[in-house]
Amino acid sequence: MEVEITKWRSMNDGNLVGFADVLIDNTIEVRGCALRKGKEGALWIAVPSRKYNDETGKTKWVGHVGFPSDEHYKSFQDKAVKAVTQQMNDDTFGTEDDMPF
């Protein structure tokens, strides 16, 4: 799986580091992925999602993008986090004016 970041917007709000548009295998672009920082400092990508209440009333989230296996999901995470961290300090990499989110 090839992963490329096509847009980046830094946010730094709580555990939200920023938003990225992620191109997968030069075929599909997932827009508005959130880069988040966990309690231990590990970074992870959250694909766009919506919240819902399960049968017990507990709030949960479901992504608009799915992966066929845990292996595919892990590969996406590893490659997307690596790609976005390489772009985070690139001043020529997008501006707020061209970001839809």
Image: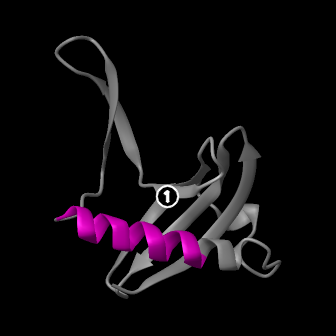
**In the displayed structure, would residue 37 be above or below residue 20?**
above
Q: Is residue 34 left or right of residue 69?
A: right
Q: Residues within 10 Å of mark 1 (few under 14, many from 20)?
A: many
Whether residue 87 appears in magenta in the rendering, the answer is no
Identity of the residue drawn at 43% across and 66% down:
77
Q: Give the percent coordinates (x, y) of residue 41.
A: 66, 51
Q: Which residues are magenta?
A: 69-83
Q: How many marks?
A: 1
**In the displayed structure, would residue 63 be above or below residue 9?**
above
Q: Nearer the viewer, residue 90 or 73?
A: 73
Identity of the residue drawn at 75% across and 68% down:
95
Identity of the residue drawn at 73% across and 58% down:
10
Q: Secondary structure at mark 1?
A: strand
**In the displayed structure, would residue 72 be above or below residue 57?**
below
Q: Nearer the viewer, residue 30 or 66?
A: 66
Whether residue 80 appears in magenta in the rendering, the answer is yes
Q: Residue furthest front?
A: 40
Q: In which quarter of the view is residue 50 placed? A: top left
Q: Nearer the viewer, residue 100 or 27?
A: 27
Q: Residue furthest right?
A: 91
Q: Which residue matches tag 1? A: 45
Q: In which quarter of the view is residue 18 placed? A: bottom right
Amino acid on which disc 1 is placed: Ile
Q: In which quarter of the view is residue 35 placed? A: bottom right
Q: Give the percent coordinates (x, y) of residue 22.
A: 47, 72
Q: Give the percent coordinates (x, y) of residue 99.
A: 64, 62
